[in-house]
Image (tube, helix red, strand yellow):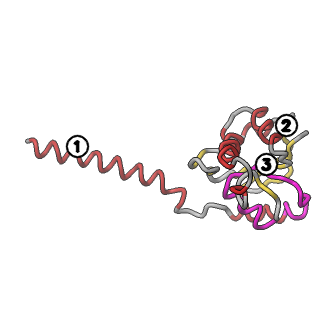
Amino acid sequence: MNKILVVAIFSVLLIAGMYQVKYQTDPWLVQVVTQGELDATTWINENTSPDDKFAADIFGGELIMGMTTRIPIVGGDWANAPDPMQRMADAERIFTTTSSSEAFEICRKYNCTYVFVPLKRQIHAGYGWKDVEVDKFSDTNYFKLVYENQDVRIYRVIY
């Protein structure tokens, strides 16, 4: 009887562990940056200034820097910037807060002129995969939608 109980407990723990591993690895096993995000870089090149700064997660930031040479909060050479840990925390907070004013204040801290908001994937700013709270960017006191496709929205930060 004890052997059956031990096997049952071990089986439950094994299954729970497999689901946790799947949850942690799934975002890494799909294409991280979408085709629509890549397409948005054409708009960025044609409609923004080379000195504009973008709020983006690491993957959006890498895409933006690589395809447009615009500067993100994180991504590209950001790790060489002062206080990279704070940059990661702030970039994550822009996307995870529900507060429009808080997101705006963080954008202002880094002089961001645009926010690159993925619609079909989670963001990763250095502390794990997080869901994007998109609704706050609809607050026209702080943000103006300037570009949209099926995968991404780009908002201008209103100063």
Residue 131, horizontal then vertical, whole percent: 61, 44
Asked whether the beta carbons under mark 1 and mark 3 sit within 8 Å of each other, the answer is no
Residue 32, horizontal then vertical, whole percent: 62, 61
Q: How many labels, in total?
A: 3
What's the residue type where badge 1 is placed?
Ile
Which contiguous range is marked in magenta? 43-68
Dot 1 or dot 3: first in sequence order is 1
Which residue lies under the disc numbered 1? 9
Which residue lies under the disc numbered 2? 142
* Res. 42 mark: none
Residue 49, horizontal then vertical, whole percent: 91, 58
Describe the element under mark 2 as helix, strand or loop: loop
Tell me if residue 41 comes above or below residue 127 in the rendering. below
Residue 58 shown left or right of residue 51 in the figure: left
Name the one closer to the observer, 149 or 45: 45
* Res. 115 mark: 3
